[in-house]
Image (tube, rainbow, N blue to C red):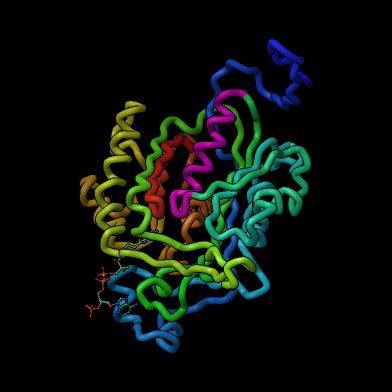
Amino acid sequence: YQRQVKTTGFPIYLDVCITARMGEIMTTRIIGTGSAVPKQVVTNDDLAKIVDTSDEWIRPRTGIRERRIAAAESGTTDLAAEAARMAIEQSGIKPEELDIIVLATSSGDCCFPNGACEVQAAVGAVNAVAFDISAACSGFVFALNTVHSFLSAGIYRTGLVIGADTLSKLVDWNDRSTCVLFGDGAGAAVVRAEGTGVIGLTMGADGTKGDVLKCGGRTTGNFLTGKKPELGYMSMDGQEVFRFAVKTVPEAIKKTLAGSGTELEEIKYFILHQSNYRISESIAKRLKLPMDKFPANLERYGNTSGASVPILLDELNREGKLKPGDKLLLAGFGAGLTWGTTLLEW
Ligand code: UT7
C-alpha cells in the first residue's frame, strides 16, 4: 500500500511493502539452505604443477587438500542462483514470496547490475528488492544480520541471504602465497520473520588495516591518461590476518554471547569462516572448547570467502546434524578488516 509521509512541502508517497505489522518485534528463522560449488576439483598436487608449492607445505599449514574452481564461462551469479534455488526449494516458499535478496560477494561478475538482481531474475523473485553487500569473508554474516534487521523491524517478512565468491578470478595464479588458499562456491539461506531464530549479533570493522588483505579494482587508466585500465590482483599479509582472526573472533564471540545471556557451553556448533584450520584450532583453544564444536570443510573447498559459512551451514543441515533448539554461532572475518557474528537458535 502507499503511505503518505508528512512534509512541509509536497506530500511524499512511499511505496511500502510491509508484510508484518510495524512495531512487532520479530526474530529471523532460517527455513531453508542451499549451496553450490563448481565441478572442477583442483588438488594441491595440481597446483604444484603451476607454482612452486606442494601438498606437504599447504596441508599442514592450512588444512586444505583441494578446492573447486569455476569454469571460465561460469561466474559468481551462476553459483549464487544455484544455491538460492536449493534454499528456496527446501524452504517450501514460492520465489514470489521473497521480499528481499541480499548477496554478499566481493567478486561479482560485473560492476552493475548487482549480482542480487541477477539472482532475483534467475529465480523469479519478482517482488523482492535485491542488492549486494561487500564485506569479503564476513559477507554472509553481515548480509544475514542486515536482512535480520529488516525482518525484526517488521519491514519485510521473507528474505534470501546468499554468500558467493569466485576468488579464482581475482588471485594472481603466479603468487603461491595466495593462490593455494582460495576456492569458488556459494551458499544461501531463506529466512523468515517467525518463531525463534537470531538472538544476538556483533559486527565490526577496522578500515585502518585495509592494506593487510586487498584486491585492487580497475586502475585509473582511461583515454585521457592514455593508459589502459588494468585489473588488480589480490595481495595479503597472511600472518597479520592470522593474528587478527585469532584475537578478534573469540572476543566477538564472547561479546555476542554476553549480550544475549548465553553460555559458551550452550552452543552446539561454532560455524566459522573456513580460512585456515589452524585459525579455527587457535580460536577453539582460546575459548577452551573442543574441536568437535567447530565443524570444518575447508579440506575440500579451501577458503571460499563469503560462501564458506553458508556452505558449511547447508552441509550440516542436509546431513541432519541440526535439530530444533540447537544454538549455533556463525562467525565471519576477513578483508576490511571486518568481522561479524550471528547467534541463532535453529
Ligand atoms: O579469509 C581470510 C583470508 N586469509 C587468511 O585466512 C590467511 C591467514 N594466514 C594464513 O593462513 C597463513 O599465514 C598462511 C597459510 C597464508 C601462510 O602460512 P605462514 O606459516 O604464515 O607462512 P609464511 O607466509 O610465513 O611463509 C613461510 C614460507 C616463506 O618462505 P621463506 O621466506 O621462509 O623462505 C614463503 O615464501 O613459506 C613460503 N610459502 C610457500 N611455500 C610453498 C608461502 N606460500 C607458499 C606455498 N608453497 N604456497
Task: Give the residue displayed 35% in from the left and 34% down from the top.
Answer: 256
Instruction: Identify the main secondary structure in magenta.
Output: helix
Q: Between residues 75 and 258, which one lies in front from this camera angle?
A: 75
Q: Judge left or right: residue 330 versus residue 30.
A: left
Q: Look at the image and tell me in which quarter the N terminus lies.
A: top right
The stretch of residues the image draws in magenta is 135-154
Whether residue 40 sits left or right of residue 271 in the image: it is: right
**Residue 111: x percent and y percent?**
63, 57
x and y, in percent, of residue 141 in the image: 47, 44
Magenta-drawn stretch contains 149: yes
Quarter assignment of residue 180 = bottom left
In this view of the protein, can residue 121 be seen by the observer? yes
Camera sees residue 318: no
Q: Quadrant of ligand 1?
A: bottom left
Q: Position of residue 117 (x, y in %)?
A: 70, 49
Q: How many marks?
A: 0
